[in-house]
Structures are given as structure tokens and as C-alpha cells.
Amino acid sequence: MLCAVVRGRGIVYHGSVAMTEPTLDKKPAAGDKAAPTNARESPSSTGGTHDLVEGLVGPLREMCKGRLGPVQWFRSTWQRGGAATGYSTWTFSDKTQVDVLVKLPVGPREYGWTVGLGHLDNRLWHTPEAVSLPVPRVIAAGEMIGGYDLAWFVVERLSGPALNQAISEPVVREILHAAAEFHAAAAALKPVEGAGEQRDWHELIARSRELLEFTTMPETKRWAKCLSQLARALPRVLEVWKSRPLETWCHGDLHPGNAMRRELGPDEPGRCVLFDLAFVHPGHWVEDAVYVERQFWAHPEVLGKTKPIQELRRQRRALGLESSGDYTELAAARRVMMAGCASAWWESEGTPAYARGALRVLEKHLGLFV
């Protein structure tokens, strides 16, 4: 039994879903890379948001009727934004406890999707339906606290570390399987509607051409030639891309740093769970597939025989999710656009290995549009 968003001062238990989809304003350079493998968690320092949330712990625990234990706030080295995150415990009515994670404040999109997909009656916490969710189980949530309009939620604490700590071909397949399950669950929760991502691709490609000579990218002459061809072919590329059916709630930030496992038992491998739902948006499932693929352009050997486009399509079809449009042509258009931005995003995410991989992708697929 999935429960949804309730506006007001109380904890979310039942209700109907009410979500809005603002224009996607994610900065692609920072978000399209997995969290660094040496990421660490450290206690949150005082000042700013921390002082505010410390003053809200008391009201929060009161709203949770004393079931929420003391909160130990922390900040990960890869964490972005001003939200505070902390570890705690939750005591059920039968006096059993589980480890939980507290987060506040939470943006409207992340709140809506996390609560809409993950909240369930506490009595169903250990049911097969609950432990099979592809997103964190939500134990409590609300949109006001201590008189402030601040959304917050308490979710299960997943066993770490994030899957980027031991990336491999089977891990990539796990993430793609979870992505297909997320697509199915999101579509069941709310019909796909609204505008897709909004990016000025003409400006991005022009910026890539302009900044190319100021980067340390290898093969700049080959890059210059490809970017010149891409600039001429961009109207055709965008014609293909803009024709894509917006039929999927895309995760939007699908990398191994946003995936962990839920423990299922001593003899079970655990199941992949996706979190950080702040960038969910209407689109085509190819966006999520290319997002995953792109992370391995520098090291395609990690993928082995797995092809993210074909694998995600296979997983979706197994769940009864069909798609419209020519997915091979859409994937080629998406690859060309993303690869063409390498020099525009060089300062924040560029490496020589990635530049070589992106160039190979650009040269391979650009001919379809020239």
C-alpha cells in the first residue's frame, strides 16, 4: 500500500499525490559523474543550515511522537546543496527498532517522488512489497516543522557503501534493472506529463567550440573538425531529439553513487535501491540509458558485454513497458549532443581518458546526421 503526499503539519500517512514538475535546471557537468570513490562522511559543522536544523530536532521528534531517536548529522564530501542529513533510529509500535536517515529541508520534486514512491504503512515495513521497492522506504515525512515551511523525511538507512565503490558489469546491470523498476513505479504513481529537460544545445555546442583551445584535451584538431561538423548537423540532431515521445519519468541522475543495496537476509545479495530523486523529469527512457553509458566512455571495458541501451530496453520490456520512437536513432542523437559538450564541461568533469572516449563516440555516431 503506497501512501502519498499530504500537505500540512502532520506526518504523511495517507492521501492523494500532488506533484508539480518545474523546469529541469540541473547543471549537467556536476551531476553526470558518479560520486568520487574516496568520498567520506563527516559530522556536520556548526553554523548556517546546521544551526537551524539543530533547533528543529525537538519539534521533529515531537511530530514523530517520540519514535525518532537522537540525530547525528553528517555531510558527505560529494553532497551538494544546503540540506542536512543525519543518522538516527526509529522505534515501531511493537518496540522493535530500525536504523534510519533523516533529511531536511527537502526540495519539492525530491520530496514528492521519494514520499510518493516510498511511503507505506509502518505495519507493512517488512512485507515483500516493501522490501522490493526500487527506492528507499519512507517511514515518516511532512512539509512543515516548527512553524517553518520545510519539507523533511525519514527513510530507511541502506547498507553501504554506494555501488560506485566496487563498480563492475554486474553492478551496472543491477542499476539498469532498478531503473526499469523505477520507470514502472513512477508511471503507475503519476501519468507522464509536462515539459522535458530544457537545454540550449546550440549555445552549449558553440561554447564547446569556443573553449576547445583553452582546454588540455587531447586530439584538439580532431575535436575541432567534429565540433564543426556537429554545429552544421545540429538542426538535424535536434529535429530527431525533439521528436522523442515524452513517455517516461526519467530518474535524471542515474549513477552508481546514487545507488545502494537493501539487505534482504544473510544469504541474500541484497537489492539495488535508487535515491536522490531531485532530478526526475518527463522524458524518454533513452536519456537514463545514455546517462549510464556515458559514465563509462573513458573505460568501456568495465561494461564488458553489457550495452546499457539494449539492457535497459530488455529490462523495461520484461516489466511490460513498451516504448515509442526509434530508440537507436534517439540514442545516437543523445550521444552526439552529450559528447559534443565535452569541452564546455571540461573544467568541472574533464579528463583525458573521458575526452578520448567522447571523441570516439562522436566520430562513430555523427555520420548519421551529417
Image: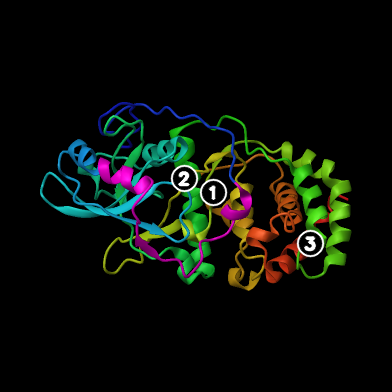
Q: Residue at x 40, y 48 (%)?
A: 135
Q: Earlier in the sequence, mark 3 or mark 1?
A: 3
State left or right for residue 247 relative to residue 43.
right
Residue 214 is marked as 3
Q: Which residues are magenta?
A: 27-56
- Give the image location of residue 219, x and y in percent: 82, 69
Q: Earlier in the sequence, mark 2 or mark 1?
A: 2
Residue 200 bears which disc, if any? Answer: none
Q: Secondary structure at mark 2?
A: loop
| Residue 252 visible to the viewer | yes
Q: What is the CA distance from the residue labelled 2 to the residue labelled 1?
A: 19 Å
Q: Residues within 10 Å of mark 2 (few under 14, many from 20)?
A: many
Q: Position of residue 61 (x, y in %)?
A: 20, 42
Identity of the amino acid at label 1?
Answer: Arg
Which of pointers 2 and 3 lies earlier in the amino acid sequence? 3
Q: CA distance from mark 3 to mark 1?
A: 42 Å
Q: Which residue is mark 2?
A: 277
Q: How is the image coloured?
A: rainbow
* Discs 3, 1 touching: Cβ within 8 Å: no
Residue at the image point whose x is 33% and y is 37% from the top: 2
Camera-nearest residue between 214 and 155: 214
Residue labelled with disc 1: 316
